[in-house]
Image: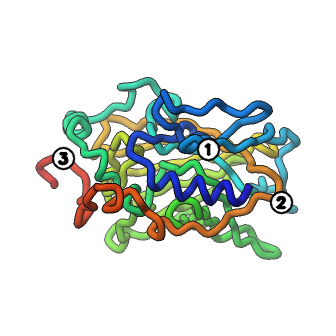
Amino acid sequence: MRKVYSLVAVLAVAAPPALSAVDGLAAQAPAQQQPAQPQGGRGLGALGQAVRRPPPPTTPTPRLPDGTVDLSGLWVGGGTDGDIETGGGLKLGEIPVLPWVKEYMAKVDPTADPSSYCLPMGIPRKAPYPWRFVSDPAPGRAAQRIFVIEEGNIHSYRQIFMNGKHPDESVLVPTWFGHSVGRWEGDTLVIETIGFNGKVWMDRRGFPQTERASVTERFTRTNMGTLERVVTIDDPGAYSKPWTVRFTARLSNPGDELIEYICNENNQYGGAGGFGAPREFPVIGPPATR
């Protein structure tokens, strides 16, 4: 199984922009090439590949000694790479874009997606590869930080500060993943993120994320094998009102582990694929600000 993950990860980077991932569970080739799902479980298809997956376990949600929900485990899915609108449970045209975004997306160059050049996908976009939560609890205290390890996505990670406090905006450095703070609301981990650099594409269609964006994620482990993720994007720089998408991740097979994956090492999409990588990836915004 580990070798299959490695092969899928390398090939997907080399794929053309038409490839997408729905609900983070399947990297889909064009319709005429779409492989049938294997019998007996959900599959991950990529360039004709298929991974057999038995149904996820439905035993009760695991908990830590203090009663907090245990989010550990290797997860697959929980987001989308191809189309955040339909992949997140919305209808086409339902995302409330501002007029400049509609014009921008009509002209967007699909070969300029930063993630195709081994740059971060940001939030809430996800590659269809395994990922996991890692926390730093200690005896007598709750976790001070929670990390999201995205080994299958350009060898990256996210850091969530569990003190619930963002730094003052005057000292906040804009980044691809922004600055995330978390808290527990009952059995749901709520993560709020600000401080984005305005360069992220939220999917392969090119839905932009500006520097004014605020993203709220709600993770709920409903049983042993299922993790629900509800994401609300509030970005007045690009959208007329906040909007929400929903995804589901499933626990990977017993014994599966993350393996090293270096996007740059075998990226056949950029120059090797005939596309000249842009010299820089500009901040996205209305014409007056670009």
Tell me, yes or no, if residue 121 can be seen here.
yes
SS class, disc 3: loop
Instruction: Name which residue type carries label 1.
Output: Gln
Q: Amino acid at mark 2?
A: Leu
Label 2: few (<14), some or many (≥20) within 10 Å?
few
Type of amino acid at the residue the image marks with label 3: Pro
Q: Position of residue 36 (x, y in %)?
A: 64, 30
Mark 1–mark 3 Cα distance, whole angstroms, equals: 40 Å
Decide which of 71, 69 is in the foreground and name it.
71
Sequence-earlier tag: 1 or 3:
1
Q: Contact, CB < 8 Å: mark 2 with mark 1?
A: no
Q: CA distance from mark 2 to mark 1?
A: 37 Å
| Marks 2, 1: nearer the viewer | 1
Q: Are marks 2 and 3 in contact (CB under 8 Å)?
A: no
Q: x%, y% of residue 185?
A: 67, 49
Q: Mark 3 = which residue?
A: 286
- Which residue corresponds to mark 2? 64
According to the image, label 1 marks what residue?
Answer: 49
- The nearer-to-camera label among 1 and 3 is 1
Q: Position of residue 290 (x, y in %)?
A: 16, 55
**Relative vertical location of residue 112 with respect to residue 179 in this rendering, above or below:** above
